[in-house]
Image: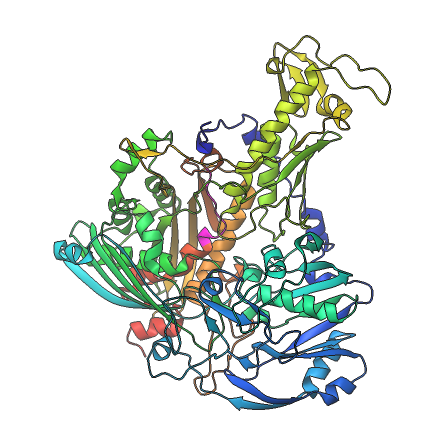
Amino acid sequence: MEYRPWTWEIPKTTTDMQHKINRQDAFERVSGQAVFTRDVDLPGMLYAKILLSPYAHARIKSIDTSKAEALVGVRDILKYDDPDIEFDNETLPGFEVSRNYNLLTLPRTSEFYSHPMGVVVVADTEEICDRALRLLKIEWEERPFILDMEESLKPDAPKIMPEVKFTNRSAKEPNTVLTDRQQFGDVEKGFAEADKVIEYTITRARNTPAGVEPIVCVAQWRGDFLDVWVHHQDLPQAALTTPNTVREKPRSPLVEWTKLTVTMPYQGSWYGGFSWLSYSYAFIRLTAILAKRAAGKPVKLLWDESGYYCGGDDAGTYKCKVGAKKDGTITAVQWHMLGIRNPAMEKSHVATKIPNILGTQEWALINKGHSMCFRHGTHTCCPHNVMFARVAAEMGLDPTEVALKNDGCNGHDWEWVTRYQKENGFPQRWSLKEVIDKGKKAIDWDKKWHPPGTKKLANGKMHGLGFIHVNEWHWHAPIPGISFACVTLRNGKAAIIAARCDMGVDTESGARLAVASEAGLKYEDTVIQERRSDNTNYHFWQPGGSFGTGYITTQLILAARELKKKILEYATIPKPGLYTSPAQPPHFPNRKPEALDIKDSMVFEKANPSNRKTVREVADAFWAIDPPIFHPPAGTLYGLTSDGKPDSELYAMARQAHFIEVEVDVETGIVGVTNIVCVNDVGHLFNPEGAYAQQYGGAVMGLGRSGTEEHVFCPKTGVALNYDLIGYHIGTMNDYPDVQCLINESHLGYAAYGAYGIGENIGASMSGVTVSAIFNATGKWVLDYPTTPERVLKALGKI
């Protein structure tokens, strides 16, 4: 059977229902009754804390725990060389780590300042843990540290992080984790065709989630059964139930899959999947090991400073070369990245017609902490949009016109994309033009745009406009099993059952709307049951990467359609009797299911709508003998073509465009943002308020990363100097004006109704937006992020 979710008919009730959405978790959150993982408090619970390294790179030579052990209330002390933990390790935590290196769960050597390592104390209270850690007598061996990746890449650099085990084949001693090369077309040919070749370098400082709910995990054993309460993006079953042979001694499973229960309380401090990162799986394993030693008592392991240890995947140095024609057509792009991710892998190839792209990458370990893809996409959105701004400036063109000139997919121009759309049942829409037109109108671009450095305001500041664009993500349809929820109906209410953490982005309301509108139910007659696993037989796609809406709703719509079919079948067959009672006549005798429909939780006859029964009246009697429980897998896409030939590529056809207006004080270097417009083409909108919240929050986060956020390290000691919200200036709503949030619906995705995601898009794409605005205001490029006043003044020649 053909499976093309973008062609599915949208229920007529969807639009009206969007305005009736209310959050299932709203009362608990606003009343303060929501239980987050840090709030979990079990009878007899013990607390655990890990030693945090005071050095950027050091090894424990010896450790005396006697005074800590003698402290009243201390129940256990676990050291790095204990057989329970010595070889325990993890390679699963996320993209960067899982592909490239393995970490010890409790290492002897610190890899960065404030690294959790060496020893864990378990005690009756948090305060006793803190006191016991201060009583440890440790002899340290300080080791050379490296903060600059270019230095770490050198063949004669000192080897750092000796307990990290490389798993990538391209790794090289002493410190190189990965080298990569991605090429499309022939860049040398493209540069030869260009009227002008531009070369420049971008740097991005390390930034961090700076979260307000630090990492925590609670574990308790009931014999061979393990219960865990996680602060985590993902279900950690695999990390606890699978062995590995990466280290000298094989790692055994801690528990059988069927004996593990995972509870995901409300989750705070996310900003793009924070608890998914780096140490999180190893942290859960450590909690389970400590709980095993506690003989049945629950153990809560806390890492209070964890909000700062992890960096984004965009930090590094980007050496850029771009060739373009006078009309703004880009003929070739070459990027070399010193950092953890190749910028050529994603956005610029999938979202342009640029025929020639080369991206190379070198990544080496440094003693700043591990990195991960929170607000993922910045590593490619930033150089992508600086490229367009530079080309427009060099050729004296409007950057919005340069964006349209180069729009396409995977090297194909938009004329080709339009043919592909028609051939495969998509609407023929030019998403980029639609979002640019909406954004330009909202910010009054045509009236306000001016050549760089030419508009001085009455207050003496320089006026500037900034513009960025990139594809919307994620556009894929789910593959079977990747999101696998169950929908059941009882007492007239549809329950959606699937494990997933509630981190506040409210994908849940969109999921409820999808089920209600497809099944013909009232929105309030749906409920979501998540945050606790049934061994993940039923699970949603977990938060992260803007996949959630497309993956979750597509599979749920299939389930809702089966539910509706079953309700209509119930309505036309005899009602079962209770126990030995005879069957009763059907609610709609002599009618076939196709003669009936469901709306507002009422089953009615199409030809005679006044002949109606509630869904509950129709379905309740069947629960005991034929319960309505549905969990179909998502289908598999096939039969896609381009120009009549099979083509399995999934093309990113929807776009986003964001605009800011600034005032730059050329005496202080302060950049004041006075206007923000965000336009996202989400394909199909399930949850308006949820989408607007992602735009607003993402704009603030992106502007923070673009303008103010950076980790600062002491060059003499390697110690981080701003692991707090005083020295680390994360963007907040008080720093920026209201955001105009605009949505476009082109239905150009491969998921249900052509939907795309939105969550990660804005925070990532706007993480470089200040550069173009500062250039338009001053005529000077500030290509070192964040674009702080000091860097602006330096570009102006004032310092």
Q: How many marks?
A: 0
Along the line of sight, the residue nearer the viewer: 270 or 785: 270
Q: Spot the residue most to the top.
A: 590
Q: Is residue 478 magenta?
A: no
Q: Is residue 221 visible?
A: yes
Along the line of sight, the residue nearer the viewer: 389 or 496: 496
Q: Is residue 761 magenta?
A: yes
| Above or below: residue 323 compared with residue 422 | below
Rendered location of residue 2, percent (x, y): 44, 28
> Residue at 60% of width from left, 31% of height from top?
560
| Above or below: residue 597 compared with residue 149 | above
Rendered location of residue 506, percent (x, y): 59, 46
Rendered location of residue 717, percent (x, y): 48, 86
Q: Spot the residue most to the right.
A: 580
**Image quarter of residue 460:** bottom left
Magenta region, residue range: 755-762
Q: Is residue 453 visible?
A: no
Q: Locate residue 280 relative to residue 776 in the image: left or right.
A: right
Q: Report the magenta stretch's main SS.
A: loop
